[in-house]
Image: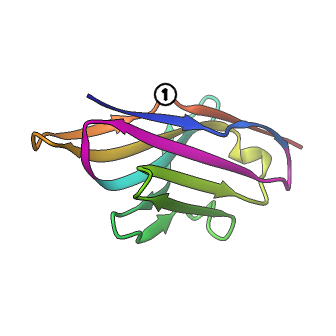
C-alpha cells in the first residue's frame, strides 16, 4: 500500500507565494514520473507541471516562469514552488505519481488534494 499526501495550500493575496509538498509513503521501491494537477472551480483537472525521476521538468504555459517543480528522492517528496500567484491559480492541487513497490507492482496514485485560494 502506497499513498500520497499533499500539504501547503492556503489563502494568499495575488502576487504572493506558496510552496506545496507531496509526500509518498508506504512500501515504496522507486518513484518514476511525478506531476501536479489542479482543478479550478467549475473546471476539469488540468496538468500544471511534471518531473521525471531524473528531474527533467515540464510546465503548462500558464505557469511557466512562475512555478517550479522539484523533488527530493531521499525523502520521496515532490514540491511545487508557486510565485507571483494570480487569482486564476485558485483551485485544488493534486499530486500524481507512478510508484513501484518491493513486490514489483506499479501504482498510479493520486493525493487527496490541497486547496489554494488567491485573492485579488
Query: Does residue 23 appear to the left or right of 84 in the view shown?
Result: left
Residue 54 figure quarter: bottom left
Of helix, strand and loop, which mostly describes the magenta segment?
Answer: strand
Closest to the observer, 71 or 15? 71
Determine the residue positioned at 65% across, 57% down. Answer: 81
Q: How is the image coloured?
A: rainbow
Query: Does residue 87 appear to the left or right of 109 in the view shown?
Result: right
Residue 106 figure quarter: top left
Q: Quadrant of the C terminus?
A: top right
- State the image coordinates of residue 89 (x, y, percent, origin top left): 70, 47
Outermost residue toward the front in this view: 74
Determine the residue positioned at 66% across, 71% down. Answer: 65
Q: Quadrant of the N terminus?
A: top left
Determine the residue positioned at 54% across, 61% down. Answer: 69
- State the image coordinates of residue 86 (x, y, percent, origin top left): 78, 51
Q: Does any portion of residue 60 appear in the rendered image?
A: no
Which residue matches tag 1? 112
Indicate whether residue 44 is drawn in magenta. no
Outermost residue toward the left in this view: 103
Determine the residue positioned at 66% across, 40% down. Answer: 8
Q: What stretch is highlighted in magenta?
A: 13-30
Q: Is residue 89 above or below residue 7?
A: below
**Local SS, label 1:** loop
Q: Does any portion of residue 99 appear in the rendered image?
A: yes
Query: Does residue 51 appear to the left or right of 64 in the view shown?
Result: left
- State the image coordinates of residue 60 (x, y, percent, origin top left): 53, 61
Q: How crowded is mark 1: few (under 14 residues within 10 Å), some or many (20 or more)?
A: some
Residue 109 figure quarter: top left
Amino acid at each position: 500500500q502506497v499513498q500520497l499526501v499533499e500539504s501547503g495550500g492556503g489563502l494568499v493575496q495575488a502576487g504572493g507565494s506558496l510552496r506545496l509538498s507531496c509526500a509518498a509513503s508506504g512500501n515504496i521501491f522507486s518513484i518514476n514520473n511525478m506531476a501536479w494537477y489542479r482543478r479550478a472551480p467549475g473546471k476539469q483537472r488540468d496538468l500544471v507541471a511534471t518531473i521525471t525521476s531524473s528531474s527533467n521538468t515540464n510546465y503548462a504555459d500558464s505557469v511557466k516562469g512562475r512555478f517550479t517543480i522539484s523533488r527530493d528522492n531521499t525523502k520521496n517528496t515532490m514540491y511545487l514552488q508557486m510565485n507571483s500567484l494570480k487569482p486564476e491559480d485558485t483551485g485544488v492541487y493534486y499530486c500524481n505519481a507512478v510508484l513501484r513497490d518491493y513486490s514489483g507492482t506499479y501504482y498510479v496514485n493520486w493525493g487527496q488534494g490541497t486547496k489554494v485560494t488567491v485573492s485579488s
